[in-house]
Amino acid sequence: MPFASRERPSIQLGILKSILNSLEVESDTFYFNREFAERIGHSSYYILASKSPRLLPEWIFARKTWGERRLVDTGYEHFDGEHEARFEAEKFIDEIVNSRDWNEYEIIAFTCVFDQISSALCLGRHIKTKFPNIITMYGGANLFESATLEFLSKVDWMDIVFTGEAEESFRAVMQSLRDGEPLPPSIKGFAYKDGKDVVCHGSSILHDMNQSPCPDYSDFFNLIGKEESVTMPYETARGCWYGEKKQCKFCSLNLEGMEFRHKSPENSYKDIVHLWKKWGEYKIDRIYIVDNILEKSYIQTLLPMLKGEGIKFFWEVKPDMTGREIETLANAGVTCVQPGIENFDRDLIRIQDKGQSVLNCVTLLKWCKYFNIRVSYNLLTQIPFEEDEWIDRQLLFMRKLTHFRPPNTCDISIERFGVYYQKNLLSDIRPLHEYNYIYPEHIDLDKIAYYFDYDIDRHTCGSKKLMTESLIYRWKVGGWRSLRFVSETTILDRRFSEKRVHDLSIRDREIVKFCTEPTTKKEIQSRFDLYKMDHLIEKDLIEHMEGKYLSLVEIEDGDLSYCRRKDRTNQPKSKNLPVLSTHER
């Protein structure tokens, strides 16, 4: 349903279709998001799906869902095209309902992730009204347990809702319905109506990821042309191995399923190659790995297996990777990563419990530029408890990084399963006001809301946010910038408004190379004796932070030999470099 991305198939529906195939239950998958995008235009659809004010996509279908004129008045009147989109949405729902004999189906099931709840509720209501014998099912990340109970108790047209990870519960429920048996009483992960009562079996997680089948995307690829660029999602793991130890305060992605689980490398490899060979004749830009974080052992197992397959990947990673590990990513076909880089200041990172260093973040940017891996990341703004001094320090440091990939900016979001909400760390946490434009008064917003607001000095925080956005805008439009060796001892510096040339000694060059990755003073002295580096720090060629030194100069061929950090690859480590005297040539 709208407003899911039109450029990729739904992995949720693909997995459920595979389960139905194994039960020998016939099914069709409908991509009404694509039909709606065609109706209002791809550009308008993209803006509404990704660039619009918060919750606007839900509002577009809300009036048709609830039939309340009160939902006309909103704070969205300054967004161009919202009323036209809503008018088209209402006609769109009527046309879907009237275009088919829905009695051909015994069950209609909807996946609801983020901005899909209103559209799914809307279509479900109007199908159920015209075809009352159909069973309606719902599931997805936004139907957590409290929302499930609230919707089921107050929405007449919802029959069954799956909560949590539904592979096991969906299979059990569908098998019972297929065989004409009562719904399974001992299976967790779903809720249903029993007369006027709501029976809830709690939420569920899948402990063995190898039990999640390879998704069936046949209905999606049967819709599209072979020249249309698409990405194909696949999942190797759920949860977060770092979040199991300490959850990042802003993160709410894993709901109740923080426990980290992953498929065996053999099963992941088999599924990925199967999907690529089955649909490889289509224009697939990359396989989009939807995991929250890369499983560490895959660096030794799955990634080397994928080398040479000719497949391109997107992956989310933690930014503490070594150069050799990033080389393994590149060799496996990873062309784009989303690292956990949210800030470039140690205190801003600390107050979010990120568990990483600024220099590790920069090191990842360096190696990804060298291996031509695109880095997509968001710099968080308006962070609770941030201090002006930290942001000023971050702005100064970011000016030294303009030869690397710039971030986007994103205000921190207070979400239901994040630490800020769960531990009530902020003043007056409440559902976003925009929910009042979407749901009628009888729906309890405290139970169904996923996004929340809180008391914050927007004026004070806003000024620092504008400064950050201004710097990043100049970073993005500043053209091609670099900081690299142009001869053995000459560095060309194009990071700033004026071109700079730094002439170094042979010993300067050696120490810059030695600090290719974060390096301690002890390590430097073991090789360079008492060599001074202040002049290299003053020129912004080396950064000293938290007891370590890192060269900001771009990577060159051969720099892997300077990697000394312990990594998770099977590659042999470099031999120890000889100790150099303090005498400069």
Image (cartoon, rainbow, N blue to C red):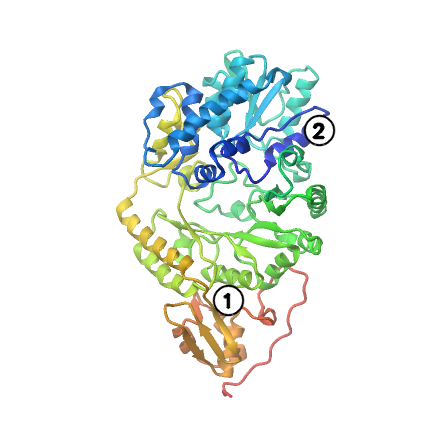
Q: Residue at x 41, y 34 (%)?
A: 55
In this view, the residue in front, 489 or 482, is 482
Report whether 444 appears left or right of 295.
left
- Please tell me the numbered disc located at residue 333: none
Distance between the alpha carbons at the discs numbered 2 and 1? 51 Å
Q: Which label was assigned to residue 21?
A: 2
Q: Find numbered disc 2 in the image and state the secondary structure of the residue it sits on.
A: helix
Instruction: Using a 10 Å C-alpha cutoff, classify the residue at mark 1 as few (fewer than 14 neighbours), some (14 to 19) or many (20 or more).
Output: many
Q: Quadrant of residue 275?
A: top right
Compared to 61, does 580 lie above or below? below
Residue 276 drawn above or below residue 189: below
Whether residue 294 is visible here, answered yes or no, is no
In this orientation, does residue 326 appear?
yes
Residue 540 horizontal/vertical position (percent) = 41, 71
Q: Position of residue 325 (x, y in %)?
A: 61, 60
Residue at disc 1, secondary structure: loop
User: Of the residues tagged 2 and 1, which is closer to the observer?
Assistant: 2
- The disc, 2 or 1, on the residue closer to the chain's N-terminal end is 2
Rendering coords of residue 260 (x, y %): 59, 43
Q: Amino acid at mark 1?
A: Pro
The image quadrant of residue 406 is bottom left
Amino acid type of disc 2? Asn
Q: Nearer the viewer, residue 160 or 28?
A: 28
Disc ID at residue 518:
1
Give left or right: position of 534 versus 279.
left
Badge 2: how crowded within 10 Å, few (<14), some, or many (20+)? few
Residue at x-position 43% and y-position 33%: 57
